Amino acid sequence: MIHYQLRCDQDHSFDGWYKDSAAFEKLAAAHLVECPVCGSDSVTRALMAPAIARTPGVKGRAEAAPLPPAESALVPPQPPAPAPLTAQAGPPGVPQAAAGPMPAQVLALLQKMRAEVERNCDYVGADFAEEARRMHRGESERRGIYGETSEGDAEALQDEGIEIAHLPWVPRADG
């Protein structure tokens, strides 16, 4: 996973996470990377400071927070989801980001992503892992699906070569 600081042609700054630099370049060239502020699809990478890995055990090393349970989806390649959410204290029903309340632009982008998944994929509920396996074996029509699965089942699917994505499932924009 690679993190980029991005800028649109309207001079809005935002960040994004991508599988690798080639994935970002491909998505940007196809105009699939959009500014969360104005919706412009003319996006470039901004100048960034390099990420420097810390040696394990060095004082001040930040520990990764555990990921919360998330909806899983088997979908055609799409822009990756933003940075994972972590559970923190806050008002019930209001998503929290690692540093506190989620910025409105990020929440709006995640709500848009949820609406796209719901519009274009079939909800299979708790049968997610089994339906993904049936599709992988050719026993069921290949299509986008979403539903719930345990972390263990998600890991097993990936070990079997079945690509899935964990999506932060925020409340609907209309609700």
Image (cartoon, rainbow, N blue to C red):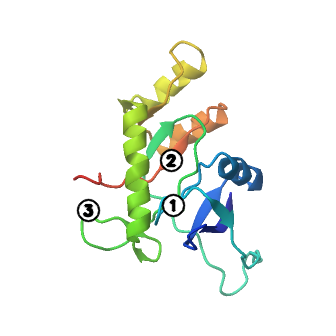
User: Residue 124's mark?
Assistant: none
Residue at 48% of width from left, 38% of height from top? 73
Q: Earlier in the sequence, mark 1 or mark 2?
A: 1
- Residue indicated by mark 2: 166
Residue at 69% of width from left, 72% of height from top? 46
Work out which quarter of the rendered image holds the N terminus and state it.
bottom right
Residue at 51% of width from left, 60% of height from top? 84
- Residue indicated by mark 1: 84
- Residue indicated by mark 3: 93
* Residue 20, placed above or below residue 104: above
Q: SS class of the residue under badge 2? A: strand
* Residue 84, placed above or below residue 79: below
Q: SS class of the residue under badge 1? A: loop
Place of residue 90 in the rendered image (x, y in percent of width and height, measured from the top left): 30, 73
Mark 1–mark 2 CB contact (< 8 Å): yes
Q: Amino acid at mark 1?
A: Pro
Q: Earlier in the sequence, mark 2 or mark 3?
A: 3
Please indicate whether residue 125 sits to the left or right of residue 157 in the image: left
